[in-house]
Image (cartoon, grey):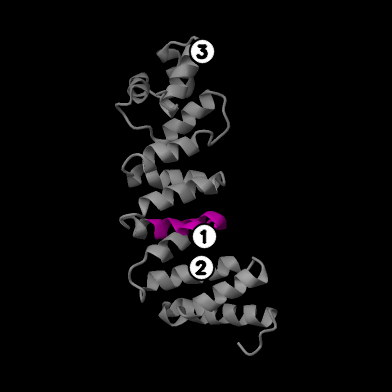
Amino acid sequence: MKLAPTIRSHIEDYIKEKGYKLQQFSNTCGVNVGTLSAIIKGSRPLAMNQLDQITSAMGLEKGHFYEMYSVECFVEAAPHWRRLEPFLYRCAELNKLGCIKKVIISVTDDRSYIEELFEVAEDLYNKGMKQAAFILYECVAECEKYQHSERLALCQYRIFLLSCGSDQKIAMQAATRFELFVDRLEEEYQLDALKDLANLYSALHNFDR
């Protein structure tokens, strides 16, 4: 049975096709030749910055191998936060939302990265990468085991805010779900949250609410 191609096999094939010595390609991509050799042999994991350097040296578009990287590093292998965190940021920057979803489903099986994922979501939200943040907030909210936690309440608040730009039905559903969590927010968020709910209901002419 023929093995599925990997990132390493693509790199090796490229070097052979171009007739490069390993040192030549090392000079082109900026990855140490010893490190590059270990990566190709599979004895060393491929870091995000190295993947980006190699991808650029091969003349491919940014993020070309991200789909494969998500499978090789986070689905088929045990995920490591040191590689996962930069991957999430780069996917958010390049709008590779499908890769984020695939990785998140895999890494939250044991719920060990919930706190870190929430912190990344907050950072992405504050940097304006709202779609990527939304995916992380939904994941954290779904996996949060403490239903009265302030973190869950803040996730639901963010999800509500990010849903307000959607169609009215989605916004209304998000508002109805979020109402249950308003009282669980930290005080610094509660007044703004009530105001945001009131503004949405007013815009939808739901004056009873």
Q: Which residue is identified by label 1?
A: 134
Q: On the image, which quarter does residue 176 sit in? A: bottom right
Q: Which residue is identified by label 3?
A: 17
Query: What is the distance, in whole Å, between disc 2 and disc 3 at their CAs?
Result: 49 Å
In the rendered structure, find residue 158 and report the number of the disc placed on it: 2
Badge 1 marks a residue whose secondary structure is helix
- Residue 126 on the magenta segment: yes
Image quadrant occupied by the N terminus: top left
Badge 3 marks a residue whose secondary structure is helix
The picture places residue 43, in percent across and down from the top left corner, at 29, 26
Residue 129 seen in this snapshot: no
Image quadrant occupied by the C terminus: bottom right
**Residue found at the far bottom of this picture:** 208
Please tell me whether residue 191 is drawn above or below residue 37 in the rendered image: below
Q: Label 3 sits on what residue type?
A: Glu
Q: Which residues are magenta?
A: 117-136
Crowding near the residue tagged with mark 2, few <14, some 14–19, many ≥20 C-alpha atoms within 10 Å: many
Residue positioned 48% across, 70% down in the render: 156
Query: What is the distance, in whole Å, between disc 3 and disc 1 at their CAs?
Result: 42 Å
Q: Nearer the viewer, residue 193 or 205?
A: 205
Query: What is the distance, in whole Å, between disc 1 and disc 2 at their CAs?
Result: 8 Å
Q: Label 2 sits on what residue type?
A: Arg
Badge 2 marks a residue whose secondary structure is helix
